[in-house]
Amino acid sequence: MNKLVIGILAHVDAGKTTLSEGLLYLSGRIRKLGRVDKKDAFLDNFELERARGITIFSKQAIFEVDGTQITLLDTPGHVDFSAEMERTLQVLDYAILVVSGADGVQGHTKTLWRLLELYGIPAFIFINKMDQEGTDRSELLHALKRQLSEGCVDFGQTGTTSFCEQLALCDEGMMDAYLKTGQFKTQQIKKAIRDRKLFPCFFGSALKLEGVEAFMRALVKYAEVPVYPRDFRAKVFKISRDEQGNRLTHMKITGGKLRARDVISNGVWEEKVNQIRLYSGAKYQAVSEAEAGAVCAVTGLTRTKPGDGLGGEEASGRPVLEPVLTYQILPPEGCDPKVLLPKLRQLEEEDPELHIVWDEQLEEIRVQVMGEVQLEILKSLIQNRFGQEVTFDAGRILYKETIANTVEGVGHFEPLRHYAEVHLLLEPGEPGSGLKYAVDCSDDVLARNWKNLILSHLKEKEHRGVLTGSPITDMKITLVSGRAHPKHTQGGDFREATWRAVRQGLKEAESVLLEPYYAFQLELPEKMVGRAMSDIEKMHGTCRIARIQDGVAVLEGKAPVSTMRNYQKDVAAYTRGHGRLMCHLAGYGPCHNADEIIRAIGYDSERDADNPTGSVFCANGTGFLVSWDQVKNYMHVESCLKPDRDLMENPDRERSEKDREEWLDPEEVDRILQRTYFANQGKKTVWHKPKTASGSPGKPAPYVGKPREAKEEYLLVDGYNIIFAWPELRELAEDNIDAARTRLLDELCKYRGLRNCRIIAVFDAYRVQGHQEEILDYHNIHVVYTREAQTADHYIEKFAHDNQKRYDITVATSDNLQQVIIRGAGCAVWSADDLRKELQRTNEGVLQAYREKQAMDRNYLRDKLSRETKERMEALLREEERNG
């Protein structure tokens, strides 16, 4: 029998559980429709779920439709239980996304859509509650196309011309078929859905069973049954316990078969399966084997965890959605926290994102959660399962840290008879990118087994930042060099060197404290918009008015979690219950009060014994500790960040380091004095270089002293920044960005031909997946397209920082933050308007000089005549005057 695993997802109160009941009832799986409000829903069988009317844990039900066995996985809709929902996505063939027709696309709906896109799961969309007043089918479909995907097509109009035209627009192959035959094959529609180019939309009311049966039949008709390999594979997505306390491992069989008493492995351990259960609601059927495509729960496994791959299946990565709040668990009086800790570890097994942390020094237990609703559920769960009535403290925000510049971290570990040195390149990544690891080191420098070991050590630990001790994120860490000893190096040596290299690099880098942000949607009476916007501004958030209709305004925006945690109560108070606030996590951003938080936490990176920042070297048979700021004076392997390792191919790369650093120029002395002795006195130094009238790079005013070395001039242009700052280019870019880019490059080429300076135009290509850095020559200038995860700002800042002593550098950009950074590196800055004026001034100057030269060089016929001919012409003129 064909098997499909389909998950059902929705924003809370969209009617997800009600639709599940309808599918089970119409398929004959249940004889009576359950209701959430009557607390008798088939899948909400947990006591707390029925009491609160929400889904807390993912459940499964098995039913058959037209010869296809469907395993339906019902997932939590509340934001606080998003981690449970995300783990379920790992085993889905298809997803059903339920949208409330009364509320439309919500913030959490967009989060779910992004997760489906990330995991590559095709989706069917059911727009529910269409029986309510005010719902507009065409308006809802337009909103789905605008906010989710243009591939959303109304399958309630099958066979119409409009339906066929919409299908044709989803895929080139379908367009060809439509133009040739005027119709589509079912297999073509299946493939478009499978490839996430087409998203069938169905409208109805789950409560009244309107449109549910047609939706169910369409699921089976247009879903493609996966083909599985013959060898055994399985993906674990959940751990739970039954009423008797037996540990259950929930998995999907993704290849071969699983039989009771089989021994299975994840490549590290082996354990025997005792029993295989097929659950449907609260009941299960024990079976002797489960085939590929089945979702089952097995007993006997003690070492599994969500995300594990068994057999030939690969393990999953870290979840995208993570907790942002941490609370201390306060045991009841007379209860030893150490006795409660192992019980809480069972809950952590079932929900790894709880992340139970034991502080040995303070003897405290802390837990990480998504929100206050999850906290209430956790409290009830501990009470029901372990009989302990715990409480929680006020809680605090989970901060993270990243870096703003590129550095090389060096770690060395060399006590007697041990040796390892590791060099890591730490680069800032895009917001939300997490930690990425790479290797850029030859096997000739470091053997492959050592490189693999270093990568393992990087991934096995949660690295702490140096500002508050919070986890680091949004960073790329690349192994660029290292050294091992043929006799003395052991595996543990590279662990120590690797972790110390990360910390040394973080100490040297410009660290940035990050805090979580909520993306919110606030509905309230129109007359109260001013009050709401004022509140949001005070909370250091941003917002905009999305729409105003029938006296109700909708505000959308972002604000820090720390300032917005309890704002729902304020909204209910000042709107007298007419306001509604909906929030979902929007990731991390720079902390709005970083200095205050750093002082409050009081973390001292130098005293963190578990995360040392220094390195251990050896001399005269004795190991000694070197602080992080002196490590590079002792390291054994040459640094990878040398001045001649530019991102451009410079013509004078062969010059010696001595030639480059021969003397400090006056501007450098001036900056040093301003940052030290004169920083708070408002004094000026005699070496300040006056600005030239044109602001051109590389025209220093003369000064008394040693003549300075002539430097080559560089003009770096932030390409897209200039394009969207010049009105004529911006207008051109709206129709054709390539044409605008070519126009800008032509203007720069013309300027390069008139001025003796090198020009580099830098364009962002960091959003292009897998894009490598490109350096091209366009006529007489250089053009750079940045690599993935590197913006034009990053490229320009690094070039300016690395080369400001070697060249006279001017950067053209209207980005205020970048201007500050560039000036801090000692380089000149032009705004977009300055660049335009400079180009116009240079062109006009050349044209004026050309006109003057033409006037001076003008030729007259009489100047070219011979003396004899001139005398004859003068005689004729005199005679003509006499005859006059």
Image: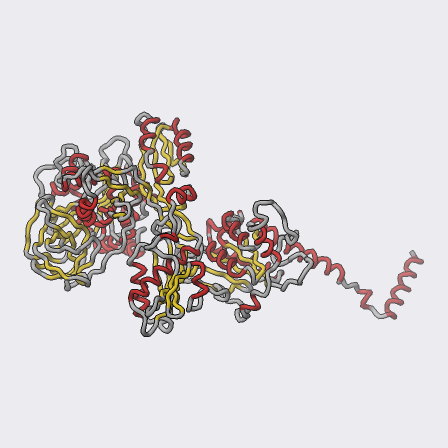
2 or 12: nearer the eye?
12
Q: How is the image coloured?
A: secondary structure
Which quadrant does the C terminus fall into? bottom right
Q: Going by the picture, which residue comes out furthest to the right?
A: 882
Which quadrant does the N terminus fall into? bottom left
Where residue 524 appears, as percent x and y from the top left, is 34, 30
Total tally of numbered discs in the picture: 0
Q: Is residue 336 visible?
A: yes
710 or 740: nearer the eye?
710
Q: Is residue 417 left or right of residue 671?
A: left
Q: Is residue 43 above or below residue 785?
A: above
Where residue 387 appears, as percent x and y from the top left, is 14, 39
Where residue 9 appears, as percent x and y from the top left, is 23, 44
864 or 473: nearer the eye?
473
Q: Is residue 716 left or right of residue 247?
A: right
- Residue plotted at (22% across, 33% down): 131
Where residue 841 appears, as percent x and y from the top left, is 64, 53
Task: Find residue 515 and report its image quarter.
Answer: top left
Q: Going by the picture, which residue comes out furthest to the top?
A: 576
- Residue plotted at (15% across, 36% down): 50
- Residue plotted at (35% across, 63% down): 497
- Residue plotted at (40% across, 69% down): 619
644 or 138: nearer the eye?
644
Q: Is residue 64 above or below residue 774?
A: above
Task: Find residue 243 and report its image quarter.
Answer: top left
Task: Find residue 202 and report its image quarter.
Answer: top left
Q: Is residue 127 visible?
A: no
